[in-house]
Image (cartoon, rainbow, N blue to C red):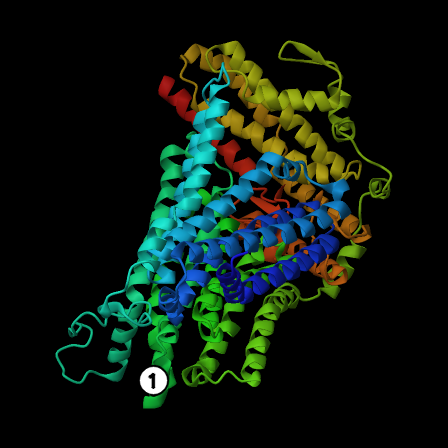
Amino acid sequence: MNVALRHLLWKDTRMIASLATAILVGTLVFQLMIWFTIWANASPSNIYYTIALWILMPNLMALGVPPMLVGSEEESGTLGWLRSLPVPWPLVVVSKSLVGVIAVGVSWVFSSLLLWMTISVWESVLPLTVESMLQSDAIRGFAFFSLELLFTGFFLAYLCRSPLRGLIILVPTIVGLFYAMQWVEAWWDSHEDPHHLWSIGRVLITIAYTAFLILMPLLPARRRLARRRSRKSAGPPPGLAERDDQPYAPSAMLGEASRPAMWRAFLWQAWRQQSRPLIGLAIVAVLLMTAFWLRTFLFGLTRPWVSSDNMPLIVSVVLVLVCTWMGCLCFYPDSISRRHFFLADRGFPKRHVWWSRIVAPALAMVLVLLLVHYLGAGFRTRPWQTITRSCCLLGFACGLLSSMWMSRSTLAFFVAPLLTLAILFASMPFLDHYSGYLSYVALAAIPLVVASWRMTGDWLKDAYRWTTQLRVSGYILLAVLVVPTTFFVVRFGGMPRELPEWRAEMMAKPMPKAFAWTSQPQSVPTIAGYLKPWLATHPLPIEVDGNLVDSPLMLRTRTLESLNLHGSNNTDALLESIQSAQRMLEWSKAARLAVLDGAVRPTEVLLYADPDERAALNTLYNRVLNLHVDAETLAMVTPAIEDALDAMASEDLREESWRMALAMEWRLYQSRRGPPKMFAGTYVDGGNYFPRLERRRADRNVDYAVHSLLSHRVDDGPPSSADFYTFGVPVDIWGTGTDTYYGRYEDRIDFYVGLGPYYKALIEQTLQCRRASDR
């Protein structure tokens, strides 16, 4: 091997040793966290995190190598020293490219080894979608994307003097290249290839594109390394956004006074050195969210270049990275230009320095949060928006601390994302099953911001002693612990108080005679038991839609289907639909009577009778309002409607049966064992952590909800709502929502008993108005 090349390889390896160590150690630590999460939650879906880590960490290496090898040498001035040595400039480019390829390759091998260990242990529960991502074609695609990211980064690093400017331009460039390749693949697949010409053309184009990527950095590298720098630009680069080559011009921020206030001078200085990269990052965020919004509302999912299901994930990752780099910009310009020595030497108050440096990046980060809030409909679900906003806040705080903490300024732009991932992976076991707590991730930003404030004095003096490192590590540990601690306090500290007197009263409340049979675990009532009183006067088979049905379950299903199956174009169809509604009202009444006798489970009223009654009344209401027929037809169907209304249970029976069903279900709940425990057929406790506390929390919330519901009549207004995270979304157990969600699975239980009389009165009033108008 050439001696010069060997020395260059050694130097470049030393240059990226800190970055490679941080990424490889981070990969191992994150994988250990994922293994713990898979083991603790016993959920194979967590293997997706391993796949994401396997893809993310090598690409983070490919993202960081070019700025570290080119940008760091530009900052330290060694790139100018290389130009003075008798070393051919292509040799410098080859050395940096080889070191970059080897570093990315090592990262891929290490991540793949950890992935193989994960799959070997949990192969039996491996999701099918994961297997498709581990095919040879998918692996080649991931590796090619890393190669594309690496050499595009080298091209921009040689092209731009500032490493941060190259990183900012790289983000939209690589996203555009990614979707351009997606579009080309979709175009290839949409055309037929009868003579296999497309396959040969695809191979040739891929080879040509790979050669272009590898040779692309040579042109800006020759301009940077082979040409002599002018006297104007001789010496080390002055910094990120220094403008020493421009004459001084007073800013409008300083005003007309010859001696501006200190805080105004600091703001002007910070804006002068932060404005260009901040504006670039803001433009990236605006363009990305605008394209995301247009994809959702204009194109939908019909175009091949916008049809990726991973688009929300990609947008979230890019936005979090943008906010993280905004946080790194707070103190990065002062660090690379060594201006903090000047500020410390002049004795300026550290609070002025700290506040002035975070104002502009914080406002830019707020802009990103507003974009996510107003243009984030493409995230499909609210948890996506919540976790994106929370991670943006956390990433900004990690960047703020890393820009002070790292002695090599450029390294902060890659340590900050790793720190963000570490805190997220540490919080993942607690938030994996609780989407309502996702916003708590943002609380981890508070200790990090406080740490940056406390570190300002050491940063100004560049006094990074071991005590400083120990304090920073303590603040990071506090940030890791604040999320699960807050989760634990809020979830279990806000439980409703115990109701011992009410519980004793409920346990002593007399139940129907047949309740003992209903409460037996081995007895599983069927629809036949639910319809038993009604079937005594309506023997099967019954004709529904021209077909005879002899099964109660089939009868109920067919009747529900026939409610809206028939149109209103003729009298026979109207009569059939009205008869179906009457049949629903009749067995709903029979089920209520059976519950009062203890003959069926209370869930038959809570889950079936009320919704069936509402569906029947709603159908009658729509049929009456849409009767655009003559008086003769109205006279023919009116008796059928009146017969159906007479079949409905009385208001007293409806409320009494509902209260009895609720009390019976509460008694049955007390005899059940968990976890998980069920109330009215749905889960009301969740989570694999703290099972005793989860059970106690669920018991108290059920007591509180049932007590609130039984203490109010329908006309008394809504009772106090129970706990948000047990009873789900919406919290509205009684009021306008008419349905309430229980537990984590969004199962609905109908607790509103006032719609039946309302619909009945409305139908009767409409019939009277129709009769009066026909006269």
Q: Report the side of 482 relative to 96 (left or right).
A: right
Q: Is residue 465 above or below residue 504?
A: below
How many numbered circles does the render carry? 1
Q: Position of residue 742 (x, y in %)?
A: 63, 48
Q: Residue at x 59, y 54 (%)?
A: 107
| Residue 369 or residue 498, whichever sits in front | 369
Residue at the extreme left of the image, as rendered = 256
Residue 555, image quadrant: top right
Looking at the rendering, in which quadrant would you find the C terminus? top left
Q: Is residue 518 above or below residue 319?
A: above
Q: Report the side of 376 relative to 493 (left or right).
A: left
Q: Secondary structure at mark 1?
A: helix
Looking at the rendering, in which quadrant would you find the N terminus? bottom right
Q: Residue at x 38, y 48 (%)?
A: 172
Q: Is residue 748 above or below residue 490?
A: above
Q: Is residue 345 visible?
A: yes
- Residue matched to label 1: 343
Residue 484, image quadrant: bottom right
Residue count near mark 1 (Cα–Cα under 10 Å), binned few <14, some 14–19, many ≥20: some
Q: Position of residue 689 (x, y in %)?
A: 72, 59
Q: Position of residue 525 (x, y in %)?
A: 80, 34
Q: Position of residue 489 (x, y in %)?
A: 63, 68
| Residue 651 or residue 74, whichever sits in front | 74
Give amino acid for label 1. Answer: Leu
Q: Report the side of 433 relative to 257 (left or right).
A: right
| Residue 383 or residue 103, whichever sits in front | 103
Q: Is residue 370 visible?
A: no
Q: Residue at x 56, y 62 (%)?
A: 20
